[in-house]
Amino acid sequence: MARRLRIEICGYHHVYNRGVAKNNIFLNNQDKEKFLQILGDVAKEFKFNIHSFCLMDNHYHILIENKKENLSNGMRQLNSKYASYFNRKHDRVGHLWQDRFKSWFVMSDEYLFTLFKYIESNPVKAKMTKKIGDYKYSATYSILNDGVPLFLKNSFVLRDYNTAELFETLSIPFEEDEMHKIDKFHKIVFKTDKDEIVQTKRIELKEYFNLIESKSDRNSAIKNAFKDDYSKSEISREIGLSVTGVSNIIKKFKIEG
């Protein structure tokens, strides 16, 4: 199956990567500090504006704005430099990352703030904190504690919101339409047509399962893929679950919904 098209054009990109076999890529706070140091160096070298970031134990999310068509080069440097550090520091060999990084191009500004909120809410979703801004290795913590790193200085949230307004807005729990917007955003797939980038109508099946971190995430992805006209047998083959198992999950959503 063809790889997802890498969009290099200038603009906003949601970038994500996680450890091989979902292993931790940060074993302590020192690792996270080192990653942010490298991120700062890469952002300066490649002229990236960072608008949001969140470093979880086995993955990271970054909202990047590139001014040149150099996203892949910059991310390759970030990931390789951190992997070299991590392997030396923890006396290990082999791949650190599960795959090349994943990215989603933000074609419409309507997704920007909801995407920012989604990234910054990761620690809340993982039940590591109770509210956005409490987790140290996120953009909102830096903003709340007046410790904004240089690479975050041009974030649109600093331009468009004062701190009180920002956190008042972020304190409102995700509503169904916001989650639908995020779900829709991560399903968008592009193709090239006469040297132009255009949106395709149907996402590849594997893309539904890119951000799976739990059984609940998997079940929701199954529901969404089925809703978008993939058959139970296609889903079964993609994720290695029996057709009966897929059917039971879909039936459960129908009952609960």
Image: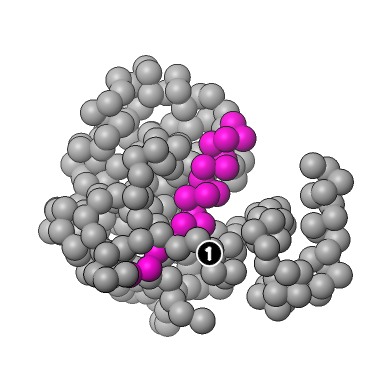
Q: Residue at x 39, y 64 (%)?
A: 190
Highlighted range, magenta: 175-192
Pick the residue in front: 72 or 45. 72
Q: Residue at x 41, y 41 (%)?
A: 111
Residue 41: give x, y in percent of width and height.
18, 56
Q: Residue at x 58, y 62 (%)?
A: 208
Q: How many numbered circles does the render carry? A: 1
Relative vertical location of residue 24 with respect to residue 256 in this rendering, above or below: below
Relative vertical location of residue 140 with respect to residue 3 in this rendering, above or below: above
Residue 142: give x, y in percent of width and height.
33, 35
- Rendered image quadrant of residue 251: bottom right
Please say whether residue 178 is one of the residues in the magenta stretch: yes
- Rendered image quadrant of residue 160: top left
Please say whether residue 197 is one of the residues in the magenta stretch: no
Indicate left or right for 27 with 130 as reference. Answer: left
Can I make out residue 186 in this image?
A: yes
Task: Residue at the far front: name it.
Answer: 194
Residue 257: give x, y in percent of width and height.
79, 42
Q: Which residue is mark 1?
A: 203
For badge 1, the amino acid type reads Ile
- Rendered image quadrant of residue 138: top left
Can I make out residue 129 in this image?
A: no
Q: Residues within 10 Å of mark 1 (few under 14, many from 20)?
A: some
Q: Residue at x 35, y 50 (%)?
A: 106
Magenta stretch, main secondary structure, is helix
Pick the residue in front: 253 or 95. 253
Colour scheme of the rendered structure: one colour
